[in-house]
Image (cartoon, helix red, strand yellow):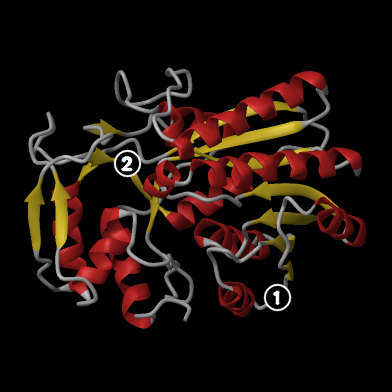
Amino acid sequence: MRILVTGGAGYVGSHTCLELLEAGYDVTVVDNLSNSHHAALERVAELAGKPLASHAVDLCDAAALGRIFERDPIHAVVHCAGLKAVGESVAVPLEYYANNVSGTVSLCRTMGNLGVRRLVFSSSCTVYGNPERVPLTENCKLAPVNPYGHSKRMIEQILEDLHHSDPTWSITILRYFNPVGAHVSGLIGEDPAGLPNNLFPYLAQVAIGKLPELRIYGKDYPTPDGTGVRDYLHVVDVARAHISALEPPETVSGIRIYNLGTGRGTSVLEALHAFEKASGREIPHSVVGRRAGDIAAAYADPSKARVELGWATERALAEMCTDMWHWQVKNPNGYR
């Protein structure tokens, strides 16, 4: 069975490609390489000992996308492609809507025209916005607070409407919480362009000396140590969830939504101390004021995924930090 992975050269996408290849699937990647590197796919093939097909194509290029579907016998699509920086989305919202939403519409139209109606979509916990309660279940109120989150929620609505119009579609929506870490080999990992937007790559770059210190935004939240709490899970566990989502028979239709998380919140200070232990280095840090739009705590109730998909996280915080550090040391300049 051949799976098309959009955004397959990216962080989650590359780890998902590796898990798919190791599970016996054939893989075709579509990635415009705007925020990723083809080298990641070369390393995935090296690790798997198996080639994959890749095409530097933008999802909005319907003609080029259609040719890929016509050339390869695609059975299902794992849709990881999309811009994902919250702060950037506030600055350039139209780019996020054009890329994330329009790209998905183009993809689904191509799939439908060519009879491929099985899709696994990479959504995000940002669709919940500022949670009314934690842990978050799939039935919690959806109230995104930034264009990135809005784009993910819009896509979810589009997919729900698509399934309603044609119940033969089989759609699984995976709401990631905070993927971190890297493959244990240190060959593939997170390679942010410019200043990291997320905590763990920032910790790694401070630990290795590329950045002077970590700035902690707020230490007066109603959390155990006053710093923000999030649900961090290993990127390999996230990648494995896509395998679980593809396992039902092709004849099964419907739309399913799952949270992907550990079910446990980790504060910024807890993450910092865990990374210091993994790296054996002190991480300079200072506390500054809260950032506008930040929330106190968000973590998942992942029980639905455990019951229905048979999926649960396997790797704890210490392993996330160790693997992230191994990647950083082995690749101080990322894939470049």
| Closer mark to the observer between disc 2 and disc 1 | 2
Which residue is rendered at x = 47% and y = 40% of the image?
148
Q: Is residue 15 left or right of residue 112?
A: left
Which residue is rendered at x = 43% and y = 22% of the image?
143
In the image, residue 260 above or below residue 77: above
In the image, residue 209 above or below residue 200: below
Frontmost residue, 199 versus 312: 199
In the image, residue 8 above or below residue 311: below
Question: Where residue 41 sits in the image (x, y, percent)?
Answer: 62, 72
Quadrant position of residue 160 = top right
Q: Which residue is mark 1?
A: 50
The numbered disc on residue 231 is 2
- Number of numbered callouts drawn: 2
Does residue 319 appear anywhere in the picture? no
Q: Is residue 242 left or right of residue 114?
A: left
Q: Is residue 112 left or right of residue 39?
A: right
Which is nearer the N-term, disc 2 or disc 1?
1
- The amino acid type, in three-letter code, at marker 2 is Asp
Quadrant position of residue 329 = bottom left
Which residue is rendered at x = 20% and y = 39% of the image?
228
Q: For label 1, count other residues whose C-alpha is less than 10 Å away and answer few (under 14), some (14-19) or many (20+).
A: some
In the image, residue 271 above or below residue 226: below
Asked whether the residues under the numbered discs 2 and 1 touch, taking CB atoms below 8 Å apart as contact, a structural biologist would say: no
Q: Gap between marks 2 and 1, in whole Å?
A: 33 Å
Question: Where residue 192 sits in the image (x, y, percent)?
Answer: 41, 65
Placement of the N terminus among the 4 image quadrants: bottom right
Quadrant position of residue 235 = bottom left
